[in-house]
Amino acid sequence: MSTPAAAHSGPIALVGSGEYLPQMEDVDRELLAQVGGASANAVVLPTASGLEQPGSPRRWAEMGVRHFTRLGTRVNAVNILTREDAFDPRWRSLLESADLIYFSGGSPRHVVDTLVDTPAWELIRARHSAGAVLAGCSAGAMAFGRLTLQPRALWGSNGKPRTEIWYPALGVLPGIIALPHFDRWIARMSNATLKDLAASLPPDVALVGVDEDTALVSLDGYATWRVMGRQTVSLIDPERGPVRYTAGASLDLSGSVAPI
């Protein structure tokens, strides 16, 4: 399994939904500004959609290229869709020169299974540790924690939520687990269930819900986190349940992201 994030890693964004859409342009402009703006090199990875219909990864890659081109920066698609792709040396030069690395949505487990302990992932981690932005939307955000889950596996055959569904993720943020689309999750899950879900985690791991069209962003090596976008971010406490933070609010999660 990959090692924890370095103390001086670059900016990171956990996005609830809306990758490559106009509602997230302000977030992406802010991220690009941290790494040179128009002079930055962006790469988009449709890895999480690798198990979907054949045209889906191409669609996400094309959306990402159009989006960042519209924002005025250089961008390329890195089409790592299978574990074999993650060993392909043709991606090396693009990853080595990347200033912003963006994972779109799909299956968090496929991201983990595809990338863990591969040359591509080691290059991505090295670039992020050197200051490059790492962004993940939906499944991309879910894959960055110490643990993650497959959302569809959360519900048992009786329709009731399950909590014994965690599995190892990529470990960029060993003390944070992101639940994207959280406004949808919370509409379906009771407060008691969310508390149980948080309580099923190790005590040094924070469970964070990120609403759609919203991002939780750190620009300073994970010391502080800022809510950006049109909705809220929720820190899910095992005792109190979700505690919401609106756009512009800052969260101190330093105690939850120390390397393990």
Image: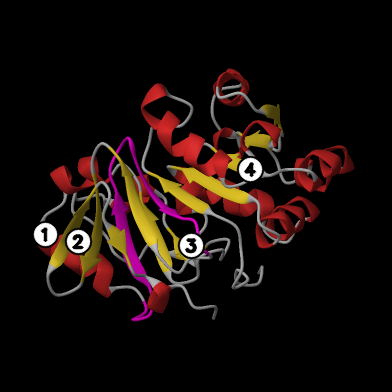
Residue hosting label 4: 100
Instruction: Report the disc number at residue 191.
Output: 1
Q: CA distance from mark 3 to mark 2?
A: 18 Å
Judging from the image, what secondary structure is the residue with disc 4 in?
A: strand
Q: Are marks 1 and 4 in contact (CB under 8 Å)?
A: no
Q: Which residues are magenta?
A: 202-220
Judging from the image, what secondary structure is the residue with disc 2 in?
A: helix
Q: Is residue 62 left or right of residue 91?
A: left
Q: Earlier in the sequence, mark 1 or mark 4?
A: 4
Within-10-Å neighbours for mark 3: few <14, some 14–19, many 20+: many
Residue hosting label 2: 194
Within-10-Å neighbours for mark 1: few <14, some 14–19, many 20+: some
The amino acid type of the residue labelled 4 equals Leu
Within-10-Å neighbours for mark 2: few <14, some 14–19, many 20+: many
* Res 107 visible: no
The amino acid type of the residue labelled 1 equals Asn
Q: Are marks 1 and 2 in contact (CB under 8 Å)?
A: yes
Residue 189 at what x, y percent from top left?
A: 16, 51
Residue 241 at what x, y percent from top left?
A: 15, 65
